[in-house]
């Protein structure tokens, strides 16, 4: 994982914790933790998506707007990095 990807993951983790109101230990959720199983709903996912677009000043592609993209920190970060790069 590159430094840029680590930075993306860290920023996405912060947004996930803020927008999903998760009470987890520091450093969690892990990159591969299933956010849907941790309690994310379609409404909280929408809020998270908008926060991610605002934070990174991007617009996610239409084909990225699916459940699998928001499965975990790694998939979200990959979608963000795809737009940034």
Image (cartoon, helix red, strand yellow):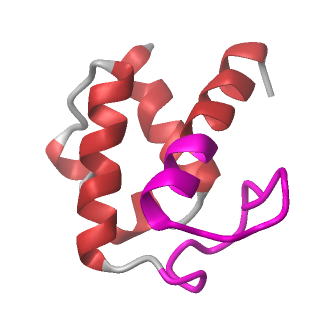
**Dividing the picture into quarters, in which one does residue 34 lie?**
bottom right
Point out the residue furthest to the left here.
62
Q: Image point 50% across, 52% down: which residue? A: 18
**Which residues make up the magenta segment?**
13-39
Q: Is residue 16 magenta?
A: yes
For residue 48, above or below residue 57 = below
Q: How many marks?
A: 0
**In the displayed structure, would residue 52 be above or below residue 7?**
below
**Residue drawn at (47%, 65%), measured in percent from left and top?**
20
Compared with residue 12, is residue 39 higher up or lower down, i.e. above or below? below
Where residue 33 appears, x then y in whole percent? 70, 69
Please give the name of the residue rendered at 68% of the width and 71% of the height, measured from the top-left corner. Answer: 23
The secondary structure that dominates the magenta segment is loop
Question: Could you tell whether 5 is left or right of 27 in the image?
Answer: left
Does 34 appear in magenta? yes
Which quadrant of the figure has residue 67?
bottom left
- Work out whether residue 55 or residue 31 is closer to the camera in this orientation and state it: 55
Q: Position of residue 82 (x, y in %)?
A: 43, 27
Quarter of the image where the N terminus is located: top right
Q: Position of residue 14 (x, y in %)?
A: 59, 42
Tell me the residue at 45%/13% (across/down).
Answer: 85
């Amino acid at each position: 994982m590159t430094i840029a990807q680590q930075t993306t993951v860290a920023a996405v983790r912060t947004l996930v914790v803020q927008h999903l109101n998760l009470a987890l230990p520091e450093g969690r959720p892990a990159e591969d933790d299933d956010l849907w199983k941790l309690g994310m709903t379609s409404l909280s996912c929408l809020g998270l998506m908008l926060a991610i677009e605002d934070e990174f000043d991007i617009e996610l592609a239409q084909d990225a707007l699916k459940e699998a993209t928001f499965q975990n920190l790694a998939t979200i970060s990959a979608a963000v990095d795809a737009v940034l790069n």
